[in-house]
Image (tube, grey):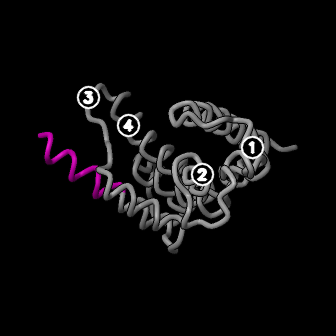
Amino acid sequence: MDDNSNKLKAEIALRARHIINSYADFLKMLELNPQFYRLDMIVLRAVIRRYLKDVDRLHTYHDMPLIDCRKIAGYYTYWFCKLKPIHIVDKRGAYQDCLDDNELTGVSKLSFFINELFSIHLGLGRINSHYSKSGSSTEILLDQKTYNTLLYSLKYRLISGDMLALTYEMVDVSINRRTN
């Protein structure tokens, strides 16, 4: 194996560990039973690899030496929703015997939107981590209407990583305007 291949594998492993930790925190935060779900590691590595290809494209073709936290959030959100690495392994427990998506409430509704919910968690977490590391007390939170609209759009609409980055940027700028 060449040095670039080893660096890529190390980068993917590092990012995967971070996402796995975020995933565990996410399930705890929503009080979801981790035995109902499985994070598919092959698909997760594919998410990371595709994200890294997007970043490389920005570096190479758009002359962007560094990309901001909103682009990172947008591309991760996109690939997570596109490839869906979280799988439901206990459908009966996760969906609580619901037979139609119109009947979903509580845990069953969270389960139905599990990849989209986690992608938002991951995206907002990336932006908030940026602020935390820079010593800012700014925290990006979405109001319920915006959150629900984004969640629905991630599930049922085609949205590019660039559009998601723009969405995160608009939310970020809007919140920063209100707090400053």
Element type where label 4 sits in the image: helix
Q: Which mark is residue 38?
A: 1
Element type where label 2 sits in the image: helix
How far apart marks 1 and 2 lie (CA) works out to 16 Å
How far apart marks 2 and 4 lie (CA) works out to 28 Å
Q: Nearer the viewer, residue 72 or 20?
A: 20
Question: Of label 1 and label 4, which has the lower sequence position?
Answer: 1
Direction right: furthest residue? 1
Q: Nearer the viewer, residue 117 or 80?
A: 117
Q: Residue at x 46, y 65 (%)?
A: 152
Which residue is label 3 attached to?
Answer: 137
Please name the predominant secondary structure of the magenta segment in the image: helix
Q: Which mark is residue 128?
A: 4
How far apart marks 3 and 4 lie (CA) works out to 9 Å
What amino acid type is highlighted by mark number 4? Asn
What amino acid type is highlighted by mark number 2? Ser
Q: Magenta residues?
A: 168-180
Q: Residue at x 74, y 36 (%)?
A: 35
Q: Which image quadrant is residue 127 in? A: top left
